[in-house]
Image (spheres, helix red, strand yellow):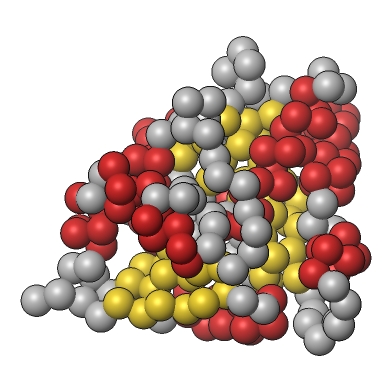
Amino acid sequence: MRGRLVAIVDHYRRPRVLGLDLLRIVASLTIILYHGDPMALFGRNEVGLIFHTDGYLAVDIFFVLSGWLLTRQALPTLDRSKYAPASGVARGGYVLSDAANGKPDVILIGTGSEVALCIAAQDLLQSQDIAARVVSIPSWELFDEQDESYRESVLPAAVKARVSVEAASTLGWERYAGNGGAMIGMHGFGASAPAKDLMKHFGFTAENVAAAAKAQVAKWKAA
């Protein structure tokens, strides 16, 4: 028997800030965050590509209670000839873009619409000779179901310098960022301004993510 599909449109930040934590504590509910707008169901964004090229995920996920968080933001489409294939979404989390030598100084972890910020921050860090790995974790639940060796290959314990980025509460992100990692998230809601100004105000910029990453690298080198 198929599970119930819950679709949540992430148009404004307020519903996401309030609702995502509540959804994540629902037993047996698998949450998947979209990297793009609802039209991407036809293949324009990260998870949407799964429907287009790897339909098995769409089929499999419907057999569990699942929630899909969508967005209507104008987001870039990931160039899969440059970044890892979208099939990685089926495992809940994967290395989207690795450090050039495969040995990152810091790991940037994003979900949904914040993945693009991590990619941009990776480019900024590279120009400063800091090797960053970008990990996309669209679904905590699916990632946590993977075996330990796979999770270690994505988030190696040896790399303690980490930054998680999500425009929602940071509650729960310590499991991936680590106890000493940096977590960029929301600590309130209700501000009113153009979206671009709000994102800058709350620290959701490539420059701020890169600065947090640099601080993490310095912190763990001194430890």
The residue under the point 62% across, 83% down is 15
Which image quarter is the C terminus in?
A: top right
| Depth check, front residue: 139 or 147 | 139
| Depth check, front residue: 160 or 115 | 115
The residue under the point 86% across, 82% down is 191
The quadrant in which residue 107 appears is top right
Q: Is residue 212 visible?
A: no
Give the image location of residue 102, x and y in percent.
58, 18
Relative to 97, say whether 162 is above or below.
below
The quadrant in which residue 197 appears is bottom right
Give the image location of residue 164, x and y in percent.
67, 51
Relative to 123, say whether 205 is above or below.
below
| Depth check, front residue: 168 or 163 | 168
Relative to 138, say whether 105 is above or below.
above
The residue under the point 52% across, 82% down is 22
Q: Is residue 63 left or right of residue 86?
A: left
The residue under the point 53% across, 26% down is 82
The quadrant in which residue 193 appears is bottom right
Residue sticking out furthest to the top: 101
Which image quarter is the N terminus in?
A: bottom left
Q: Is residue 87 left or right of residue 16?
A: left
Give the image location of residue 4, x and y in percent.
25, 80
Give the image location of residue 90, x and y in percent.
33, 48
Q: Is residue 70 visible?
A: yes
Q: How many numbered marks, from 0 up? A: 0
Q: Is residue 97 left or right of residue 214?
A: left
Relative to 208, say whether 151 is above or below.
above
